[in-house]
Amino acid sequence: MGKGFFQIPTAYNEPVKSYAPGTSEREEVLKQYNEYYNATIDVPLYIGSEEIRTGNTKPLSPPHEHKHIVGNYHLAEKSHVEKAIANCLESREKWANLTWEQRAAIFLKAAELIAGPYRAKINAATMMAQSKTIHQAETDAACEFIDFLRFNVEFMSQIYAEQPESDEGIWNRVEYRPLEGFVYAVTPFNFTAIAGNLPTCMAMMGNVVVWKPSDSQIFSAKVIIDVLKEAGLPDGVINVVYGDPVMITNTVLASPDFSGLHFTGSTFVFKELWKQIGNNIHHYKTYPRIVGETGGKDFILAHPTAKPAQVATAITRGAFEFQGQKCSAASRVYLPKSTADQILELVKADIASFNKPGSPADMSNFITAVIHEGSFDKLAKYIDQAKTDKNVEIIAGGGHDKSVGYFIEPTVILTKDPKYTTMCTELFGPVVTVYVYDDKDWSDTLTLIDGTSEYALTGAVLSTDRYAIDEATKALQNSAGNFYINDKPTGAVVGQQPFGGARASGTNDKAGSVQNLLRWISPRLIKETFVSPEDYRYPFLG
Ligand code: NAD
């Protein structure tokens, strides 16, 4: 604590800009996109005060035009990862002892830089790296990241204000120190905001961080690093390395000073990391904190009373925005027989109104490319398999082409088998599978949904019958960490809908909430007695 009980500026959600034709923000972001498109950036490792160019590089290309190169990034060797750890440990004492309001100011400044001078840059970089439309980039890279920074500062101040009662003659107080050692952030490709949040929320609480972004997000990760530098984050607090994820992770987890993992990505990788940490447990100085937000197989369930147009819109937006590459994207849908045809006709009409998948630089495109060739090939395989499987029919889309970009048509699969592979497996693409249930089987369908997938991230129920909503809310309490009533299952807003799931979807530590920040601190209770006793005898001794 410094020399006052400081009140931080009240956090608020950053308003989403429209980018409608004729707006200055549209002009600015397209100008920035073209600048990036025609340049070649060179992304070094950031370790301590150094920008390290190893000379061992990989190219950066937009997924919607994979033959076009917009930059290179340098790959770390083991010695660089060790150097990153050493820099964390060197920087730790000074950073951990900086008063909290100074730390808060850095991240609040970062939020304002993104809201202002870096907005077009972070959005254009996200359009380039992850093939997001401008709306998807704006809600993620600009607004959600800004919200994470503002709200986390508010949550941090709430945590510090949480203090115990004190009896007469004593003073109890709690200080919340960062974890001993250093922490490790491993981030996914799909949200620039998550890539920014995972390392910064730990650093905000006084921790020093090794950050490994996804290879497919490095172009926009570079803007995050530029922002943090301009906001005044001291060197060595967040050290950034890329390259072979296994080598980097093995090196990090081998350090006795490793004290926490903040992971977002796929379930298999997270479970492997957890196992590795368990195997090393005797080696660590403290029990590492493990937080992971992982895969999903998110559902939409329509009750016979749901309005068809509302269900169809929830499907179209929930399944296809950002090509279904959101952990929360709707990928399995349960429709009642009485309204299924009507709903599916509306979904097909929506899909028919989309342009063919293309570049986000053409702002009339709703669908762009999937992230990389591995993802494209996996999706194409499942779609082609569905074309030949019994009990399955593709009723919309089904096409794919990777000659220019990794383009997969938005695809709707209709299945008579509620346990068909695409009802259970996370595909992470613009593919949704629909199962039609008999209206009288509503209650059984709730049991079916709960038992169909290993995941429990998001889910939505649409109905105008309050008894049905209540029944679904109870029956599906373990099936989704974020449960939506009469809405799509995507689009959580920081400060309003803290996000995370249980079962194989993660540790449910709710990104963008106090719960998450609590994982990155270790409390120390201090009891001070003002007048200490001088005789051991209690009165009962006589
Ligand atoms: P991914 O698991 O392929 O990669 C995530 C990160 O882990 C990357 O930085 C990657 O380089 C690293 N990694 C990969 N293999 C590794 C290994 N063997 N050892 C150590 N690190 C390794 O995931 P992705 O494709 O980037 O992201 C998509 C996945 O993330 C989906 O499963 C999605 O559901 C999930 N996701 C979940 C949430 C959530 O909040 N629950 C949010 C976003 C994404």
Image (tube, rainbow, N blue to C red):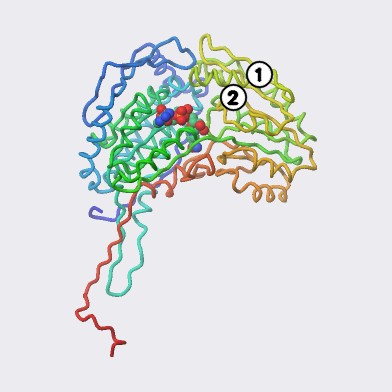
Rate crowding at label 2 as few (under 14), some (14 to 19) or many (20 or more) other CA atoms within 10 Å. many
Which of these two is toward me, 533 or 230? 533
Relative to 231, say whether 367 is above or below. above
Residue 515 badge: none
Image coordinates of residue 500 in percent, x first then y, are 50, 42
Relative to 18, say whether 365 is above or below. above
Judged from the image, the quadrant occupied by ligand 1 is: top left
Determine the residue positioned at 27% across, 42% down.
257
- Reading the chain from its start, which is encountered first: label 2 or label 1? 1
Residue 397 badge: 1
Which of these two is toward me, 133 or 165? 165
Q: Which residue is mark 2?
A: 430
- Dot 2 and dot 1 residues touching (CB under 8 Å): yes
Q: Amino acid at mark 1?
A: Gly
Determine the residue positioned at 62% across, 25% down.
431
Image coordinates of residue 135 in percent, x first then y, are 51, 27
Task: Answer whether residue 286 is visible to the viewer in this image.
Answer: yes
Q: Amino acid at mark 2?
A: Pro
